[in-house]
């Protein structure tokens, strides 16, 4: 039943579901991952509200002549760094960054398939950047806000197959929003409590008494409102908060529960309920799952995680690889599916914020802080509808609402979003035949079947209009013959590709020619990537990067990508000219167009040489 109510001029649509009274759910498991928008993971999923075909975002909002960027395909092999968020560039786990904090507190661009999880650039998803990307609902500011086309990259089934398998067999929510248009910390507060305030702290990361950004320090933070965990304790309902770090009770910007006043003043509650992720595995095996579980990523790795990910974060927070995080999540899901508790469990997998990645749907603004951009959300349960795309409007407070309705609890805070949020019961059918398990191998490595083992660019200085040969050695170490595409890149720009079919164990050398026409002067790293062509069953992708090609301006002897008097002086002196005229002493600040004809040429060199006492016939 749908009821619309008017509250202070704002209309909220509430699903008043009769399903909760029929619920067969005794265990809710909330798995929280990091930093991906819906379009970034499921923008090309069939039937979902994904990337429109004509999407192209301006590079500069005030100057359309600079062009636009369309969506493109990313892949796993190199991490994307993030700035302006909770972690510095290159850091994928807050424990690596916030150990000191814990101690203190105790043109235009269209979407494209990302060819790498990192192209060496940064994305931000701070409050200010997110609102610039939002552009008052026009959703056209992502490229301009980020200063990077990486925001338009997306993944697909070839990159994150288990997640797409779950969507095929269970429920994909394509209208699920992060609660705040900004970074991780405030969104984790919504996950725990349904709100981001109020607080009487006065910090730059607080707006009108509510938290909107990540704190510069965790020291002294004491959050005085209630959490769902506290409410469950009061009602005598079992719960556990599992964190992957060695000290699970130490706060981070993801592990927010220890920052709440209730748990600071009731440390026994914290130690009794906050456990390491390994305890979740044990609890599932022992038929001892609590009524409500949260699982926060950290240093803990499942035993099945491929060794290539030994030093990888499993959070999926760039620069962490998505395949590593997916393997970790699949392992956790497998533990539930292989447990006696499976028949009465619902698993919700979601991501805490958009991570700086583009999403095309304007989030509804229910108050001054959100909603934020859509995030991927999967509902896995024997009672989840089969292959269903749920377009009901949800947000992080819907997780609380689901628990409240399922276990007959009131809203956590009277002002919290869970008062009005939909409860996610539309994702379930308690009258259906229970769905079977879907055990995934949990050891997927993007690119394990095809390897690019060598990229040998011409490591000399070349000018625009010249060609450089790049030799790529591609090998198939897998068990089956495969057809795959090899594409060569100069930095992030593709310049040549070729489809190759290889029998198992064979390799081939491919030579590509890079014509530098149209490339700006600068340093270019050569790389090659391989992935399966359409309709190939084996997922294969890898990359190799080797060396740098310098595209220089002819006459740029100093290598500073400009031609000035310093270059001409060096050249003149190499011919024996000796400085005799003081007017040419400050060569670094003089333009090389000595005769002012608009070009730098031999005439300028001759004039300069003559000033140095050299005479030509």
Image (cartoon, grey):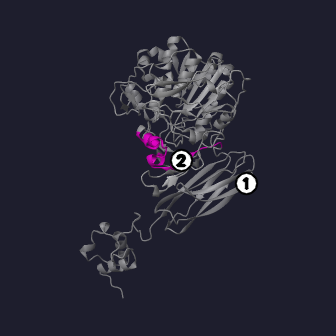
Crowding around mark 2 (Cα neighbors within 10 Å: few <14, some 14 to 19, many 20+) is many
Quadrant where the image shows the N terminus: top right
Magenta part of the chain: 128-157
Q: Residue 229's x, y, as percent? A: 50, 18
Considering only vertical position in the picture, is 393 above or below 448? above
- Residue 276 visible? The answer is no
Q: Does residue 148 appear anywhere in the picture?
A: yes
The question of residue 132 being in magenta is answered with: yes
Which-is-in-front pick, marks 2 and 1?
2
Looking at the rendered structure, the secondary structure element under dot 1 is strand
How much space separates mark 2 and mark 1, taking CA atoms? 32 Å
The disc at residue 502 is: 1
Tell me the crowding category of disc 1: few under 14, some 14 to 19, or many 20 or more residues within 10 angstroms, Cα based: some
Q: Point out which mark residue 601 bears.
A: none
Q: Quadrant of the C terminus?
A: bottom left
- Residue 66 image position (x, y, % from top left): 46, 57
Residue 544 among those drawn in magenta: no
Residue on which disc 2 sits: 152
Quadrant in the picture for residue 262: top left
Q: Is residue 357 left or right of residue 131?
A: right
Q: Depth check: 585 or 153 in front?
A: 153
Q: What secondary structure is the stretch in magenta mostly built from?
A: helix
On the picture, is 345 further left or further right than 238?
right
Which picture quadrant has residue 569?
bottom left
């Amino acid at each position: 039943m749908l009821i619309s109510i008017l509250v202070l001029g704002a209309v909220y649509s509430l699903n008043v579901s009769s399903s909760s009274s029929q619920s067969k759910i005794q265990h809710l498991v909330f798995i929280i991952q990091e930093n991906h928008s819906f379009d970034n993971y499921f923008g090309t999923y069939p039937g979902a509200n994904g990337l429109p075909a004509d999407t192209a975002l301006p590079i500069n909002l005030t100057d359309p002549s600079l062009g636009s960027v369309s969506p493109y395909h990313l892949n796993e092999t190199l991490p994307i760094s993030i700035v302006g968020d909770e972690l510095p560039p290159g850091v994928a786990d807050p424990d690596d960054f916030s150990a000191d904090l814990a101690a203190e507190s105790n043109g235009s661009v269209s979407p494209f398939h990302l060819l790498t999880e990192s192209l060496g650039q940064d994305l931000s998803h701070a409050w200010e950047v997110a609102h610039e990307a939002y552009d008052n609902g026009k959703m056209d500011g992502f490229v301009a806000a980020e200063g990077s086309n990486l925001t338009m990259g997306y993944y697909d089934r070839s990159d994150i197959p288990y997640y797409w398998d779950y969507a095929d067999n269970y429920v994909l929510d394509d209208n699920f929003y992060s609660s705040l248009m900004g970074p991780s910390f405030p969104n984790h507060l919504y996950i725990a409590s349904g709100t981001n305030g109020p607080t009487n702290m006065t910090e730059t990361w607080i707006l009108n008494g509510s938290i909107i950004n990540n704190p510069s320090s965790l020291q002294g933070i004491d959050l005085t409102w209630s959490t769902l965990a506290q409410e469950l304790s009061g009602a005598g309902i079992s719960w556990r908060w599992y964190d992957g770090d060695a000290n699970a009770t130490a706060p981070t910007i993801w592990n927010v529960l220890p920052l709440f006043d209730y748990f600071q003043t009731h440390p026994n509650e914290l130690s009794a309920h906050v456990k390491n992720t390994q305890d979740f595995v044990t609890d599932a095996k022992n038929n001892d799952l609590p009524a409500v579980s949260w699982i926060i990523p950290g240093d803990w790795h499942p035993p099945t995680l491929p060794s290539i990910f030994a030093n990888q974060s499993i959070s999926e927070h760039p620069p962490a690889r998505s395949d590593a995080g997916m393997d970790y999540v699949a392992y956790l899901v497998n533990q539930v599916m292989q447990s006696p508790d499976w028949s009465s469990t619902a698993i919700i997998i979601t991501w805490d914020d958009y991570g700086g990645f583009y999403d095309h749907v304007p989030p509804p603004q229910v108050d001054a802080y959100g909603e934020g951009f859509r995030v991927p959300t999967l509902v896995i349960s024997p009672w989840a509808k089969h292959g269903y795309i749920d377009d009901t409007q949800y947000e992080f407070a819907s997780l609380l609402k689901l628990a409240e309705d399922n276990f007959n609890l009131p809203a956590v805070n009277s002002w919290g979003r869970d008062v009005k949020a939909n409860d996610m019961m539309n994702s379930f059918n308690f009258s259906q035949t229970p769905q079977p398990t879907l055990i995934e191998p949990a050891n997927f490595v993007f690119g394990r079947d095809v390897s690019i083992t060598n990229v040998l660019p011409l490591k000399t200085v070349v000018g625009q209009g010249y060609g450089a040969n790049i030799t790529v050695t591609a090998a198939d170490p897998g068990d089956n013959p495969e057809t795959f595409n090899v594409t060569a890149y100069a930095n992030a720009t593709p310049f040549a590709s070729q489809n190759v079919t290889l029998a198992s164990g064979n390799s081939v050398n491919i030579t590509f020619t890079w014509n530098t026409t149209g490339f700006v002067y600068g340093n270019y790293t050569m790389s090659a990537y391989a992935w399966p062509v359409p309709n190939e069953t084996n997922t294969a992708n890898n990359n190799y990067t080797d060396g740098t090609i310098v595209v220089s301006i002819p006459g740029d002897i100093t290598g500073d990508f400009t031609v000035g008097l310093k270059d001409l002086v060096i050249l003149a002196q190499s011919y024996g000219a000796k400085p005799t005229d003081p007017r040419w002493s400050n060569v670094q600040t003089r333009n090389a167009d000595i005769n002012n004809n608009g070009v730098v040429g031999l005439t300028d060199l001759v004039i300069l040489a003559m000033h140095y006492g050299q005479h030509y016939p």
